[in-house]
Every structure is written in C-alpha cells, then in structure tokens.
Image (cartoon, coloured by chain):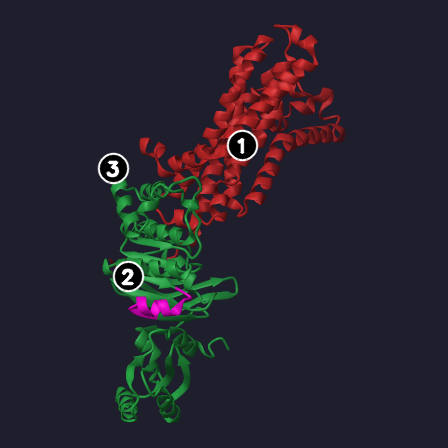
Amino acid sequence: MVIETVHLSKQYGNLQALSDLNLSIDEGKVFGFIGPNGAGKSTTMLILSTLLEQTDGDAYVCGYNVRKDPVSVRQSLGYMPDFFGVYDNLTAVEYLEFYAGAFKIPAPKRRALVADLLELVNLSHKADAFVDSLSRGMQQRLGLARCLVHDPAVLILDEPASGLDPRARIELREIIKQLREMGKTILISSHILPELAELCDDIGVIEQGRLIACGSVHEVSNRDREMSIMQLRALHNQNTAALILSNHSSVSNLEEYMGGLRFYFTGSEQQKADLLQELIKAQVVVVYFGDSKANLEDVFLSITEGVGG
Amino acid sequence: MNSFFFNPILVKEMRERFRSKKTVCILAIYLLIMGGIPIGFLLMDPMKAAALGENRNLFLLSAGIHYAMVCFVAPALTAGAISGERERQTLQILLTTQLSTRTIILSKLITSLAFSCLLLVATMPLYSIVMLYGSVSPEQMAKLILFLAINVLFLGSLGLFCSTWIKRTSVSTITSYGIAFFFVVGTGLLFFFIGESLQQAYPELFPDDGVWKLSQLQMLAGINPVFVLFGILGESIAHSDQITFSPWLFFSCFYLSLTVIFVFWSAYLLKPIRRTWWSWKKRPVRVK
C-alpha cells in the first residue's frame, strides 16, 4: 500500500472532523475522494501531507509514518492544496527552481528539470513570464509542476480543478491522466464529480468524517441495492423506449438527459440484457445502452442520502 | 554554512525584495527623512552650522532620528515575513518541502536584516556631515553603529516572532510595535516608577537617592535602549550616571539572548506538528 490510514481520527475541540478512517490505496492507483464541504477530505489530506497532527490512529505514505517520519513522507509526496498563492516578482522558471532548491536538488540539474516540468504542463512558452501574471489555470498547472520537482511517488491534490474554466479543467485533467500513466499514485478530491469518474480507479465517499463507501465507481454505484444509473440513446423511436422504460418494474427516476434517457436500474446484468432485447424487439434503434459515465453525482447523492440526518 | 547562505529562500527573498518598486521607495523615503531633517535643522539654525568642530547637537539629533527610524522600520520588515506567506497561501506548500522551520526562520531574518543593514549603511555617509561639526569620537560612532545593529537584530527577530505567532500581518505588526514600545519606553518608565515608589515608601532604607544604585533597577535601566543610547552619546539622562556597570555590554548580551530565544521559539511555532516532551506516547512502530 502506498497510502494507508489506520483508524485515523481528528478532533477540533468538540468537532469530530475525521472518525476512524481506514483507507488503503495501491501503487499507481488514482483514488478520488468525494464529499461535501467539511466532510473531512482536506483534513485527511493535511494529515497525510504532515501539516496536521491526527488525534488518533496512524497514517502511512510509502510506508513512512506521517507522525514519526515527516521528512521521508515529504520527500515521497507532492501536495497541492485547494487554494494556494504564488510569489510576486518571480518567473515560472525561478518559481520551480526555488522549490527544486527547497527539495535539495543539486543546482546543475535544476535547469533541465524545470524545462521538462514546464513542457509536461504545457507552460514552456511562459517560462520567463512572472508567475503572478499567469491565468488561474496556468497557475494551477504550474502548481502541479511544482508538486513534481522532486519526482514523488504520491500526489495529493485537493480539489485541483476548483475555480477553473472548462478549458483549464480539461487541460488539467489531461495532465493528471499523463501522471497516472507515469505510475504516480494520486489521491484527488473534487466537487466536479463526473471528472473523478473518468480519472479515478477507485473512489471513497466521505461524509461527516466517516468513509461511507469505498471501491471502484461501478462497485460503489451498485452497492447494496444492485442499483446502477444507466443511459440510453436511440436513433429512432425514443418515445417508445421511454414508454417501455417507464412501465418496467426495475426502472425508476427516468429522465431526458443529453439527447437520450437516463434512469436508475435495479437488477442483475441478465435483467439489463433482457431489457435491451425488449427495446430492440420494439423497433427502438439503440446506439447506446450502458452505465452513465457522468453519474457520480447521483451515486454521491444516493449514498449520502440520510447520512446528514 | 556555505549552502545555508545560498539556500533557496535567501535567493528567492532577495529576488522578490529587490525587484519590487516598494524597496526603492522605502530606501528613498528613508534617505530623504534621514538626510532631510539634519539638513533642515542646519538651514533653520545657521548659527549652529557656523560652529564647526564644536556642535554636538547635530550628532545627537542624527543618532536620535536614526534610532527612531530603526524602531519604526525593523519590526515592519519582518512582521509580515511568515504571516505574509500564510496570507498569500504559500506557507503550507513551503512546509511540505525539505526546508526545516529553523532554516525558513533564519533565512527570513537574514533577508530582512540585509535590507535593514542596507538602510543603515546607506545613511552612514550622512554622518560625514555630522563629523564635520565635530565633538564625536570614532569610538562613539562605532558604538552607535553596533547599538543600531543590535537593535535591528532584536527588533527584526521580534517582528518575525510576532509574524509566526499571529496569523494576520496587520495584527502582528501592531503587536510587534507594542512589544518594542514596552522595551524602548516601558522599561524606562518602570525604572522611574519603581525607583520613585521605593524611594518614597522606604526613605530610611535608601538615603541620598540610594535606591538608584539597586542592582535590579540598574539592570532595568541597562535594558532600556534610551539610557544606553544616551550613554553612548556621552549624555546623561536622570539617574543614568549612577549605573555602576557598563550598560552597553549588558544591553548587548540581553538583546542578543532575546534574539536567539525569539528565533528558536519562532522555528518551534512554525512547525506544523509541534512536540512537547510530555506529549510523546508509546505507539506501535510499523516495519517498512
């Protein structure tokens, strides 16, 4: 396990921010952390980044105990907080060289390293621009490059896409995909849940400091009730399809979605296949029938339903 | 040691500070005030300007203004060093690097001191005008420079401590001015109040103003910069002539010790996870 928490708890006065969190993330996995504001995501990330001391339990990064060996933990991870500032009067190159120096990378190696990092985050053309003059999206990408100066095995990204416009979000997502391909273990939190669905191998849903669901997106969405959120798109006879679905006993919450239909399906894989056959027999020209790609928000809402009391 | 002086924070801070227009403005305003007031003084009072080699007033005035400027500038330069990082949300990132909190604090202090020293050195040529009017020995000048340097060091570390201790730069700046005010004015007032109270309460114990010879009171006077400055300038302020030891040496040791305490305390406060010796608990150690 590259990241592991064992009965991790954190209390701020009377507020229990984190309660008995047990988390295991394998090497090379991208783990998405979902939860509303104040659920305990950032607290967990701060503890893992050695910036906050837990009240109870233990946390390990690359096998190092965050409390007992913070220096080794810092060398093993790159942390990007949800909000971070930049220094005035420093160029992008100088900014990255500063952090390379802070991680004790020898001076002769820094130039080449910084050039590579800027290329990775598509900022080579802004190498000599002052950091405070860069757009928010560029600063976020530079922040990601900053996390990588010491080539850490683990990246902890706290809502990296918050406040970014759609283009900047897509650019950032592509870089994170590249990092996943490079074998980095990534713990990422986001409010833009569909993005996590595309990026993550596993997700954890946290609410009021408790991990209430953990596993792959599919596992979590089918948890307990064998319920999945599905999408259907048809070239012709979509109204017929809507009629069939609305009368089907396993289908609920039917709605129009992005030119097709979206619905909750409670049942086995065989039952899904039977439903598809029924649709085809009714002359519905189906071009897509499967799990909804952008259903994480619904999964989150479904799982956390009633947790808040 | 060599690597310390080329550590990334020093390089970054120097770049940031000396690329800023604010730095040039501060230096210009400082020189304007430091040069303007003595020159104005001379223009207003040509009789004193005429008395070459005999007039000490200009020296006293320059030294007084210089000290006041140091008290004003030194805490302000460091009072935002750490709280500023916190406010612009760069501190957390800095604390996840391999730089120790002690390195961060010392680097911040050195860069602030470098600028304070630049201000100090830049104004030294103004003393050539002072020297023209005489009555100042080179020893006095050297002592004055050392006195100002120790004040810069102490007030800088005080500002840095407040900046680490208090989250907001504005509050940290006001607090450091408040504490500096206590040392500059408060210790002097305490000296007078305590001395006078004791004298009036126990006149039989302290005949002939003997209360001012009490070692505790003398030490209180020894940590008051105004008393020490007057001593260096060869002037006496009420009862300061009764001090039986060298206040200058005591002053230096006292404030250098406080500087060291502030630096180490700041480094401790800056640690994201602080440990006290009683907080260690036995925990199972995981084998890597």
What's the CA distance linking mark 3 and mark 2?
Answer: 30 Å
Residue A165 in the image: state x and y as whole percent.
42, 60
Rounded to the nearest angstrom, the CA distance separating label 2 from label 1 is 49 Å
Query: What x and y, as percent, mark residue A104?
Result: 30, 42
Mark earlier in primary sequence (3, 2):
3
User: Would you identify the image quadrant in which residue B216 lies?
Assistant: top right
Q: Nearer the viewer, residue A307 or B87?
A: B87
The residue that appears at 40% across and 60% down in the rendered structure is A161
Q: Quadrant of residue B206?
A: top right
Q: Which chain is green?
A: A
- Using the image, name the chain to which the residue with label 3 belongs: A
Query: Can residue B230 be spotted in the picture?
Result: no
The residue shown at (62%, 25%) is B226
Amino acid carrying mark 1 in the image:
Ala
Q: Which-is-in-front pick, marks 1 and 3?
A: 3
Image hue for chain B: red
Q: Secondary structure at mark 1?
A: helix
Residue B100 in the image: above or below residue B246: below
Along the viewing direction, whichever of B183 and A136 lies nearer the viewer: A136
Residue topped by disc 2: A177
> What is the quadrant of the N terminus of chain B in the image?
top left
- Residue B201 is left or right of residue B107, and the answer is right
Q: Find disc 3 in the rendering and name its residue.
A: A108
> Which of label 3 and label 2 is nearer to you?
2
Q: Which residue is mark 1?
A: B74
Residue A193 within the magenta-colored segment of the rendering: yes
Which chain letter goes with mark 1?
B
Please determine whether, in this image, residue A184 is positioned above or below residue B31.
below
Three-letter code for the amino acid on which mark 2 is drawn:
Lys
Q: Which residues are magenta?
A: A190-203
Q: Residue at x 36, y 54 (%)?
A: A79
